[in-house]
Image: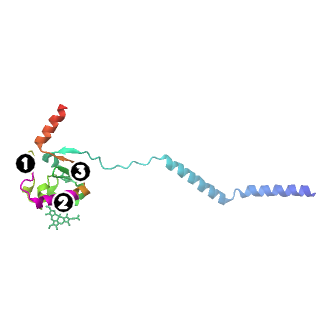
Amino acid sequence: MDYVGHRVVQEAAKETTSATTLFVPINFVLLSVLAYTVYSTFSRSNTTAPVPRGPPPKVFRTYTPRTLLPFNGEDGGPIFFAVRGRVFDVSNGRGFYGPGGPYANFAGRDASRGLSCHSFDTDMLTEDLDGPLDTLEGLGPSEMEALQGWEETFMGKYDIVGKLVSVADDNALRVAEAAQ
Ligand code: HEM
């Protein structure tokens, strides 16, 4: 065989070698890893992530002492109380105000007088739920100051979810709204 013929045979042998080295096991492994990566990337981007369910939206509304009463945290429900006309959602303080808590007496009630006097007495709470609101008559400057301190604490800690009005004022509001 002459030189040229010899080189042709050599080159042909080289090509066969590079074709067979393509099908070695490591390449199958690498190809599988690549295929899996591509598949998992695309299949992940196609699945819609579940939308997390948050707490129900809070709506600011008007309460009377009677409509506030059910918000006492019984059966795991929300806990509200009112301080000087502001209704606070104190559900996050369930340990304080929930059933069996040390301040459960304020749950669902106008807590203004009890807080200002540091008293859990039942006569601190509005007795007639359909009557006028507690005007806080008879409280002195130190009680009013204590009450303001509580209000500041609650405003920094809880959401205000409504306004406490008497049944008479609530009815008057409804009449005025209907007339508009
Ligand atoms: C023996 C007397 C009392 C003790 C030892 C006591 C103890 C406490 C403690 C340790 C806290 C938690 C404070 C914090 O979160 O850093 C607290 C909070 C509170 N206490 Fe008292 N307390 C007493 C009397 C009262 C009284 C008489 C009232 C009102 C009638 C009252 C109303 C509250 C309220 C409203 C909170 C705040 C709860 C919140 O953050 O929502 N406490 N008390």
Query: Which one is closest to the eye, mark 2 or mark 3?
Result: 2
Q: Which mark is residue 112?
A: none
Residue behind mark 3: 160
- Residue 14, given in percent of the width and then of the height, sits at 80, 58
Q: Is residue 157 magenta?
A: no
Amino acid type at circle 1 is Asp
In this orientation, which residue lies closer to the viewer: 38 or 62? Answer: 62
The N terminus - image quarter: bottom right
Q: Range of the magenta residues?
A: 134-153
In this orientation, which residue lies closer to the viewer: 76 or 112? Answer: 112
Q: Image point 13% across, 55% down: which residue?
A: 112
Q: Secondary structure beneath disc 2? A: helix
Q: Quadrant of residue 60?
A: top left
Using the numbered discs, state the Cα–Cα distance from disc 1 to disc 2 in whole angstroms. Answer: 27 Å
- Residue 79, given in percent of the width and then of the height, sits at 21, 53
- Residue 39, given in percent of the width and then of the height, sits at 55, 50
Amino acid type at circle 3 is Ile
Residue behind mark 1: 128
In this orientation, which residue lies closer to the viewer: 127 or 19? Answer: 127
Q: Earlier in the sequence, mark 1 or mark 3?
A: 1
- Residue 163, given in percent of the width and then of the height, sits at 19, 47
Query: Which one is closest to the eye, mark 1 or mark 2?
Result: 2
Residue 20 in view here: yes
Query: Which one is closest to the eye, mark 1 or mark 3?
Result: 3
Q: Residues within 10 Å of mark 3 (few under 14, many from 20)?
A: many
Q: Earlier in the sequence, mark 1 or mark 2?
A: 1
Residue contact at pointers 1 and 3, CB within 8 angstroms: no
Q: Earlier in the sequence, mark 2 or mark 3?
A: 2
